[in-house]
Image: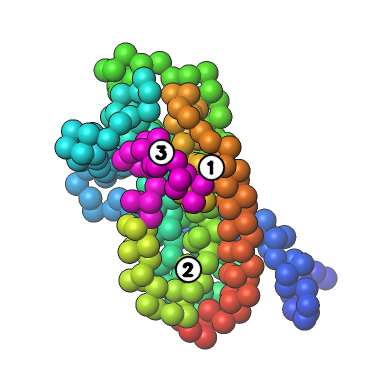
Amino acid sequence: MEERSVLCIEAGKSNRLYLRDLWEYRELFGVLAWRDIIVRYKQTVVGVAWSVLRPLITMLVFTVVFGKIAQLPSDKGVPYTLMVFAGMLPWQYFSNTVLTGSEALIGNQGLISKVYFPRLIIPTTRILVSLAELLVSAVIFVPLFFIYGYLPSWQIVFVPFFILLATLFSLGCTYILSSLNVKFRDFRYVVPFMVQFGLYLSPVGFSSAAIPAKWQTLYALNPMVGIIDGVRWSLFDAPLSATAFWSAVIWSVAILLAGFWCFRRMENEFADYI
């Protein structure tokens, strides 16, 4: 006699089994992530080259505006262009994840309302799209190092650690904003403004050394400060304050946990609002 599997839904066990469900649906995660990568560059003229052109153009604009016109100082011994590009990559990794991830649930409303699977998979796939873009964009460092005759520090081995912090922070923000965006559609207009505002509060186009000493502690509470400065420290041995570093570590983990809690708390209501 053929055996049949039976799905039992019992009250109080959803949280306990949720992580197991995430693992069991790992193939769906891969399929959705690959679909997002394909769709992102579908019907574009230059395709994946946009991953190189966007940070390259932004780097040139920031170099002219902040380096040439505003004449802001670079980190000691580091060419301004290299410093800006090192700050641009983790920032775009974060902003791309949050901007696309916050809209992910609404963009998959048909899937959410018809089939059961851990909804957390949908916004999480956006981190792989952003990571793929980050890796492609990082290739620009090779000709830049050659042009400026600059060799990265041995501390480059720590770059993955700061990218991990950026991943945790990005996912936490994405979980919170994507879940809120389902219930309050105003967030689709608020999120781009928040990301744009955050750009000017983070050391993307300037060095953290340009911030007055009396504001350094408050400024370091922004986790992207520690992440960006950490990447620059890894590549150029640029200054990295202990306050900024620990702020990035603590806030990244805290925001991830808060995002997971917020998402799980609202997940059961997604189908009703969508």
* Residue holding disc 2: 178
The circle drawn on residue 208 is: 3
Return the x and y of residue 148 as percentages of the image width and height.
29, 17
Label 3 crowd (10 A; few <14 / some 14-19 / many >=20):
many
Farthest right residue? 1
Relative to 134, 167 lies left or right = right
* Residue holding disc 1: 244
The circle drawn on residue 21 is: none
Render colour scheme: rainbow
Amino acid, disc 1: Ala
Return the x and y of residue 88 as percentages of the image width and height.
35, 40
Is most of the magenta stretch helix, strand or loop?
Answer: helix
Disc nearer the start of the sequence (3/2):
2
Q: Secondary structure at mark 1?
A: helix
Q: Work out which quarter of the rendered image holds the N terminus and state it.
A: bottom right
The alpha-carbon separation of the residues under discs 3 and 2 comes to: 31 Å
Label 2 crowd (10 A; few <14 / some 14-19 / many >=20):
many
In this rendering, does residue 152 appear at all? yes
Q: Secondary structure at mark 3?
A: helix
Say which quarter of the image contains residue 22.
bottom right
Q: Secondary structure at mark 2?
A: helix
In this rendering, does residue 164 appear at all? no
Reply yes or no: does residue 204 show up in magenta: yes
Amino acid, disc 2: Ser
Q: Are marks 3 and 2 in contact (CB under 8 Å)?
A: no
The alpha-carbon separation of the residues under discs 3 and 1 comes to: 10 Å
